[in-house]
Each structure stands twice: as C-alpha cells, then as structure tokens.
Image: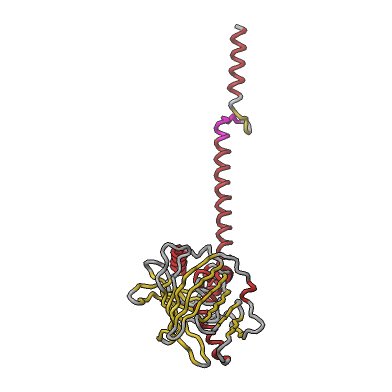
Amino acid sequence: MVIFLVFCQTQCKMKSSQYFNILGERVAKRTAYLFVGTVLVVVGGVAGLMYYLLLAGTALVVAPPAMVAEPQVSYLVDQPNSKVPAQSSLVALLDKHLEATQLSEVDSLIVNGTATSATTTCELVVMARRPNLYTLKTEGIGVEYTFQYGYDGQQGWFKQDSLNLNKDQVEFFMRVALFESSLAHLAWSYQSHEALDYRLDSVLERLPDEQWQGRACAVIVSRELLPFPIYHYIDQQSYEEVYRRTQVLRGTDLVDLEIHFAPFEAAASPRLPMGYELYFDGTLNDTITYTKIRPNLVVFESLFDAPLDATAAGLSPIRALAD
C-alpha cells in the first residue's frame, strides 16, 4: 500500500509538471510553447517584411543619380555609331590577332632587310620598342647614301647626308618612316597603358568590315599613340594584318600612304610579314624585304633619342578624328 501511494504521488507530480498555472488555469506546456513559437514566427516575419520594404525604399532613392551619371560618362567616351560593332567584338578580334601573330609577349623588335626602289637598293634596319618608340635606318648599297629617322613617343627626328630637304619634306619623310616602322603598332596599342587607363575605345575602334583584294577584312583604326591614325585591315580567316593605310601631310597636301604586307612566315615566332610594298597616292614607291626579325633583344630607350646633328620635329601623339 505504501508503495502504491508513493507511485501515485510520483505520477501526480509528473502530470502536474506537464502544465503551467496561468491565472489560476492549468495550461499544457506543449500548448503554451506552441503559442509562443507561433507568435515569434509571426513577429519575425513582420519585422523581416518591414526591413525589406525599408531597403527597397532606400534603393529607389539612391538609384536615379547613378542612372543619370552613367550616360554622361558614356557620352564623353562613346559617341553613338550604329555601324560600329560592340566593343566585345573588337576585343575578340584583337585577341585572335594576338594569338595569330604571337605578339602579346613581344616588347621589342630588331628587323633587318632591304629596300628597293626604281633606282636604288638599300640595307634597312628597324628597331622598335613598346609602346611607340621606333627608328629606321637605310644605307645605300654601292652608293653613298644614309637615311636615319627616330621617334621617341613625343617628337620625331631625321638625319641624312646626301639630300637637301626643306622642313616640310623632312616632316613628311619622318611620318612615312613612322608609318613603315610601326610594325607591331596594333598589338602594342591594344596592350598600352592608354587603352587600360582611358578605355580601349579611346585608342582603337572597329569600323565596318571591308573587302580588300578579294579578302574579307575587319577594319580597326588606331589613335592616340602616333601623330596620325592608321587603318588596319585584318584578314578574317588568318587574323593577320594584310593591309594598312593612312594620310599624312606634305606641306599643305595630304598624301595617301598604303602598305601591302607580304605573306607571313608560318614557322616564325612572332609571326610577322616578311616585307611589304609602300604606295604613295596609289603609286608603288618601294618594296621592302625582311631577312631577319629578332624579338625581345635589349633595346635601350636612349637609342630613340635625337642625335645632336639631327633635325627634330614635334610629332606628338594626338587623337585624330575618325572618318
């Protein structure tokens, strides 16, 4: 009997522990916990909804100034032109050009060859260093003739010992030599600080495609790094530059310059044309044949400075207007 009473008391205590006494009423703990949990979930949901609405309201207030500022920047850099492909198309094209020519890792070039015109043949040496340093020197074979020019990124200089040229002629031939010697100009423009700092489309712009001598070519105009724009024609099968053109001043007249590149050396690295034909106003002026192309040799920046006895001219890089 005593054991039974103890058992009953224990059971009563266990049953009483399953209830709360709330205002004189017994409420099951399970029910109370369920009620409290439900209240917490509802309150938390309401608080989360209010927080979301506050964030949404803040976004509505902040967004308009950003939307106004973006077109202003775009207007200053990208003039609308429905004929020009998107910049992503330009980047893809340039990447394929770098892959085809293997110029992405080339920081300098020394090129040897010969230049042949109607009356003379000269030995030729071109030196170049990224992003826009160039020299070109020719020496007559069998005749006393030397021509040398350089460009240090800000001014050009000219030195020769047999011709009596006036200022306009000197500046014209400096521009011609710069046009010829800037063999890697397109690749180096793409990887230049100007393209990174001021946006690619301030340095290079893709124009509508054209046919050139039966080839489908992408056309890119380069600006900023040289004192005149150059129009580069990229074969859309090989992604090599097959043709380029520009206009330069001779006195007060504009002269059309064209380069028709020779075939590329397939086994060479980098892969570059093994020469070119140079045209003035549609007439062949001379033919250049490369015999050796040496990349990434040490080329000191001082080699592009004007010698004391050279004629210098300011040929600062300027942004030329597109057609």
Q: Is residue 239 left or right of residue 69?
A: left
Work out whether residue 148 or residue 49 is closer to the camera in this orientation and state it: 148
The magenta stretch spans residue 32: yes
Magenta highlight on residue 205: no
Magenta span: 25-33
Residue in the picture at 36% in, 77% down: 212
Q: Nearer the viewer, residue 231 or 194?
A: 231
Q: Position of residue 248 (x, y in %)?
A: 50, 86
With respect to residue 59, does 126 lie above or below? below
> Residue placed at 61% from the left, 79% from the top?
154
Image quarter of the C terminus:
bottom left
67 or 122, nearer to the observer: 122
Specify whether residue 69 is in view. Answer: no
Q: Position of residue 228 (x, y in %)?
A: 52, 81
Q: Position of residue 206 (x, y in %)?
A: 45, 73
Q: Quadrant of the N terminus?
A: top right
Farthest left residue in view: 214
Q: Position of residue 164 (x, y in %)?
A: 56, 92
Vertical comparison of 266 with 3: above or below = below
Quadrant of res 208: bottom left
